[in-house]
Each structure stands twice: as C-alpha cells, then as structure tokens.
Amino acid sequence: MRFSKSNDVLGTTNRGNPTESSLCTLCRADCQGKCETWLSSLVGRKLLYPRDFGKVTAGANNTTHVGVSYNALRIQGYAFGSEGLEGGASKDPDHCIFPNVSLEGEFGNEVKTKFRIPLMTGALGSTFVAAKYWDSFAIGGALVGIPVVIGENVVGVDRESVIEKQKDGRKVIKKSPELDRRIQGYLRYHDGYGAIIVQLNVEDTRNGVAEYVADKYGDKCIIELKWGQGAKDIGGEIQVTSLDYAIFLKERGYVVDPDPTLPEVQQAFKAGAIRSFARHSRLGATDMDMVEEVYKDFMETVAYLRSSGFRRISLKTGSYGMRELAMAIKFATDAKLDLLTIDGSGGGTGMSPWNMMQSWGVPSIILHSKAYEYASILAAKGERVVDMSFAGGFALEDHIFKALALGAPYTKLVCMGRAIMVPGFVGSNIEGALHPERKDEVFGNWDKLPKTVSGLGSSAEEIFACYYDVEKKVGKDEMKNIPYGAIAFYTLADKLACGLQQLMAGARKFSLERISRDDLFSANRETARETGIPHVADANDEVARRILNSSFEIKSAEIAHVHDEMARKVLRL
C-alpha cells in the first residue's frame, strides 16, 4: 500500500483506513478532515508541496512496490526535448514551463465534446448523497468544464415524478422535477466545455427516460447506456427507512428487499426488527444467450436512440471479464459511440454489498491494460476505436496521468467518483457553519467550523484558495448563487490540474495527445508482465546501450565555431 493513515509531509490524516486511491474506505459527508483530497478542496495547489517550507526537508517513502496496482506504475521523466508546443516554442526554455502544458481536449465521434481538463465525474444517481449535494457537484463540474454524469434511477425514485402508462403499454414521463433540477443546474453554468450525461438502466428505459430527455432537452445532453460498474455486479441499490416509500418503490417496478408488501415484513418493521429496505435494479439482458443476440439488441437500441434525436451516445461498463470487455469495445466502436467508460474493481459506491465490492470483478489496472490491448487489435484492422474513459479508484493527479498513459492513445478522460464528491461535502459543511440560516438547505453537518478549517480562516474568501478565481469567472453578483461545495470542487480540480501539468512537463509532454505508454514504467516484474509496461530497468535500456557504444566525436573546427559564437554573444552583452 502506498498510503498510510497520516502523511507528515503534507500534514494530512485519514479518518478511516486508506484505500489504494488514498481515500478512506468509508468516506463520510460529515467528516471534519483531513485526508489529502479533503484538504485539497480548501487549499488547492498548495497541497502539491511539503508543508512548513524553510523549516523542513522531505524525502519520498514510496520506493518499494509490491503487487500489481496503479501505484506500481511510475512516471517517466526526461532531461531534454519537448512535445506538444508549436513551432519555435518547443526549443525555447521560456516556453517549456509547466503552466504552458495544455490540458484541454475532446472526445466523440461525429460531434466533438470539449473539456478543459481530462476528468469526468462518476455517475451520481438515485443515492440520497447525490441528491443532497447535486448543486455542488453539477455547478462545480460546469465551472471547471468537465462532463458530469446523472446516474440511473433518478426519475424512478422521485415521488414527485409522474409516469403514465399508455394504451400500447409504453410508459411516458409527464413530469420529473428532480431530473430537471439536475440537468438545468449544470446547463446554467455550462459554457461549451464539458457535458451533462444522463444514464439509462433497465428501469429507466422502461419508464421512458430517454424519450423525456430527448423531447425536453434535445442535443444538450449525452445519453448513456449502462452495463455495470466497478463496485458491484448487480443493479444499483439505495436504502430507505420508510415503509410507505419502500412500497412506492416496489409499485414503481423495483426489486425491494425485504418485500415491503408482505404482512410478516410489515409486522417486523412495526416491531423495529426491520428498520430499512434495500431497493435494487434489474440485471437486464437475460433473454439473450449468445454474443450475436446481444450485438443485435445493442445496435437496435443505439439506432432507436439516434432516431429519438440523440447525436451523442455513450456506454458505461463495469469490471466484468474479458468477454464482456471485448464486447463493450467492439460494440461501441461499431456503433460509433462517443465515449466508453470502463470501470474497474476498486470503484466506489453509494451503496453496494460490501463483500461483493471486495471480491468481485477485474481490478482496474488489469482491466484497463486489457482494454488497451483489445483496442489495439481493432485499430490494427483500420477501425476508428471508440474514445475511452478509465474509472475505478482514482483520486490524485498521478492517477490521471497513469490512466491516460496506460490507455493511450484511446483514453481521453479519467473518471473519478468518490474523490470529487468530497469537496461537495466539505464545502456544504462550511457553508452551513458560516451561514446557519442555510444549513438545512445545503445539508451542512457542522454547527461550527472545526479547527481543521478555522485554522485557515473564518470566511469563504479566506478558506477557499480559488474563491476569487470562481468570482472572476461568474462575476461578483453571481457568487451568491454558487454553493461553497462548488467552490471547493473548483479548488480541488485546480490542484489536480496543476499537479498533472507538472507531471506532464517532467515527461516533456505539453499537450494531452502526446502522452503515451512510453511515459510509464513498472516498478516490479509482475506489473510489467500484466500491463505490458516495461520494468524500470528495461525501459529505454536498449537506447542506453546504443549511447554507450556510440562515438560522439566533435571536430576541432566545430568546437572553435561554438566557442566563436559564445564569444560573440558575450561581446553583445
């Protein structure tokens, strides 16, 4: 493990046990800090560096790598050269500086979607956490200029939505206030970078979500088909504590466990023996036993969505085995989809069976390595491979670089779930503590600022390093409508972007499309074998040996010429 509970260099501490991503296994909305992601949401890029400058020196402790994981990949650095700067700037030291690294890019097939940094959110769906803190996530993502994903079941769990069954058996959504709130919250601050993506599962398809989105929002949204996620191999879940709500969800067509309509279950609930119910989605695709059948159904679904008006369609798949991975890449490529998100095990969740998260599926680094391998097979046949996004336990800037490099040139984005929800939590808690009249509105959990925050300041302007960056973007008058969670989101994204720029500059890559697998090496032989990324002792070893066996003689006349030029420069001074 790369991460321990505390990091003395950065002054950070995990409340719970840290995962491979650096986040706690259980991330709480009421947490008072202060893991690296939590603190980065306040101080931003300052947390790229050791604390207490002038009093300390710092040394790395991540030099021994055991096992196969993203933390067993290391990033190359080069002593000369530059790629991605135009013209003479590539040879000018005044231009070869990390702030000049461009993080902008695009994904898509016929219609390109631009983004400011290669990041997108995970699917934020029907969990109550997603609903409570949506404004922070959506507005923050829109201001940063990245895609934000509305997850599955948002319409189905909304008691205010109206779904009518037609004579032909189809369901039509007449009203969906929660879905409208989420889409419109993002679009209000969308400036051409990023996109709002609406996800579909079995129940969403039955309820007519795609038709509702197409009719009301047209091409403003990307529609996303969902095959699964990295945290579980069954449909999405939420937990409810109301018997009436559980019955409502069952009547809406969901699987509810235990069954709230059974008399014995209702008796147990009234007695207090049962206190909550789990709502599950369906697995889907159970009437197809052959790959050819799944392919035909998939293509028909995509064709229907296109006929409904969607010009941009994406697919999200989970950490299934190699067959399903190959199907996802092949089907998405043949259908000319705009994005394929591949979520490996290690991914986060709002609610999934714990032991299922621990034991099912393909770990992210293995899944992503095979995704590159399979994409390369299609590319070798002359096919234009679907643009991909990698997900599954990412939180830091080096994770972004490694995922982009491991899947290059096919991977355009990195998807973060839990990590970029943290700023929504901490920002909302700060807003509720500083403005008690808004505490319930923003779902703040604190009555006053804890020492981890008050040590930074007593106002939003003092606490958030990027407060004035956001103010410059939206205007001073509009700041009253920006939740503090969105400001924290922007601040964390700024830290991730700056850290990524520094890593890219060290690798002499000044634009995203120049990142390649050659920018990585494996820290152990097992990781090299599983990923195809050379071991540190093997990477560029052949070139090194050619250098050692080469002759670099410079003729005396050339030396004299160089000395003459240097002398003339001195005289000109």
Image: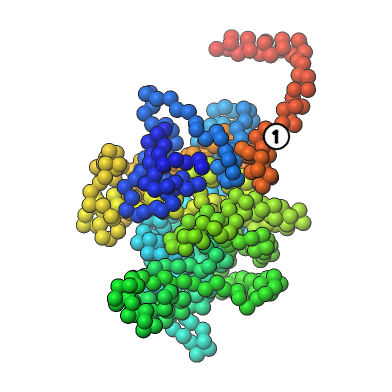
Whether residue 70 is visible here, answered yes or no, is: yes
Place of residue 175 in the rendered image (x, y in percent of width and height, measured from the top left): 40, 76
In this rendering, position of residue 151 left or right of residue 290: left
Question: Which residue is found at the position 29% from the left and 76% from the top?
Answer: 271
Give the residue type that dot 1 points to: Asp
Residue 6 in the image, given as x and y percentages of width and height: 40, 39
Categorize mark 1 by other alpha carbons within 10 Å: few (<14), some (14-19), many (20+). few
Q: Which quadrant of the figure has residue 49?
A: top left
422 or 118, nearer to the observer: 422
Q: Can residue 475 be seen in this view?
A: no
As drawn, the residue found furthest toward the left would be 437
Q: Position of residue 11 (x, y in %)?
A: 37, 36
- Residue beneath disc 1: 538
Question: In front here: 313 or 240?
Answer: 240
State the residue at coordinates (55%, 56%).
345
Question: What's the residue at 26%, 60% (across, down)?
Answer: 440
